[in-house]
Amino acid sequence: MHNKHNAQRRKSYTGFLFLIFLFLHGTHAIADETLDEAHALVEAGRAEEAYQLLAPLQEIRAGLPDYDYAFAIAALDSGRADEAVFALERVLALQPDHAQARAELARAYFLMGENEAAEAEFKDVLAQQPPPQVRQTISRYLNAIEQRFAEERHRFSGFVELGLGYDSNVNSATSDDTVAVPLLGGLLLSIDDAYQEREDSFANLRAGLNYTHQVNSTTHFLLGGSVNTRRNSAETSYNNDTLDAFTGLRFFQGKNRYTLALQGQGFWLDNEQNRNLTGATGQWDRVINARNQTSFYAQYAELRYPDQETRDVNQQSLGAAWVHSFDMPGAPVLYTGLHGGEDIEQDSDRSDLGRTFWGLRLGGDISLNEKSKLELNARYIKASYGDDDPLFLKTREDTTTDVTLGLQYKLDNAWHLKPQFRYTHNASNIPINDFTRYQAQITARWDFK
């Protein structure tokens, strides 16, 4: 009932900017008969017909402000707010002072539920000192946004995910059965079967819960966590469990979002505690326009190994990412990221365990149809350690390549199926750290909020 009420109220606001439309259109000439006809259809309440008239012209006329604006209005009033946003951003890229486009972009964000972005755009329009009738209309929108913020003051969301699959190397180990050890004069030693690569089938269960409390319109309190448990069919000594938790604050300022968070993680191997992590993260996300978003972050973490304290390190890293969505069939999204940092060893006698690293991430997705989306993610990480390995008498150098290909299939608004394949190769100049791994699994996921 609550969702139905919100939908009805949102629909009622669709026409609230009609006064803006009439006022501002008086100074914006329609370029030709087609645009004039579309304009008339929209004013007559026949936006779907206007959309069908203009949509076939996108390939040859997208990028022309008059066309893009007319198409955006038709798309917006026919229930296609996402398409309207792309068209309006094209208008504003060429004509930043186009007040009509700015107002309609605010309305599009509002209808999409992007409340912070809508609020920022509406306030930009108000800054241009529009007539009193227009200001009253915008005030209604801003009041509605404030009411949304109040209704969403306490929000829970989460997921449950079950996966079944095959892993060619559950212990990320070398495939070699012997190794030459320089410290022993190159003596060739046999590697125990338990420390060579082991294949197995597995089941994986993940679940997470997030809570958001809206302190005010610009500040949110965050709290959440997740649990992941993996069970192998035969190689049970490599069964593992991971528990993550975080809390923090998120601040909104126009198209900027700032997050400060504390995090903790526990990792158990074969029911024994293997590693703990505690840390803090600061992140800045900025929406450049409807198609581009950037992120920058800094992170600090302390990794502790209760049974192997000599491996303890403090990690610090910096990173940046960029996301771009394309205005074309399939609505493809491309993202890329770059990061770097160092692990600082806590045992002064084991400088070979400290390292510096940098990495590149590249990926994206594309919709194949209304229910299916193809996803690709690739990572490349280069790491150099701080000193010679005590057994192999040389400084360790690792290069990790990781590629995941998946197909997400939407069963309904809450349930998804995802078959995926993952390839990992760690190339190392220390033989026992060189390995290749293949994983294939199918996952069923339920999201709730």
Image: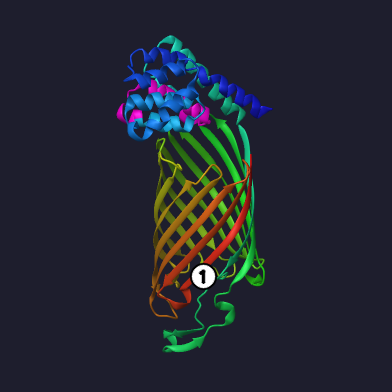
- Residue 237 seen in render: yes
Numbered disc 1: secondary structure: helix
Which residue is labeled 1 in the image?
310
**Percent of width and height locating residue 270:** 65, 68
* Main secondary structure type of the part rendered in magenta: helix
Q: Is residue 242 above or below residue 367?
A: below
Q: Quadrant of residue 96?
A: top left
Q: Is residue 364 above or below residue 437?
A: above
**Percent of width and height locating residue 245:** 59, 50
- Residue 126 seen in render: no
The residue drawn where x is 59% and y is 60% is 441
Q: In which quadrant of the rendered image does the C terminus lie?
A: top right
Which residue range is magenta in the image?
91-119
Q: Quadrant of residue 243?
A: bottom right
**Percent of width and height locating residue 14:** 52, 21
Q: In which quadrant of the rendered image does the N terminus lie?
A: top right
| Amino acid type, mark 1 | Thr
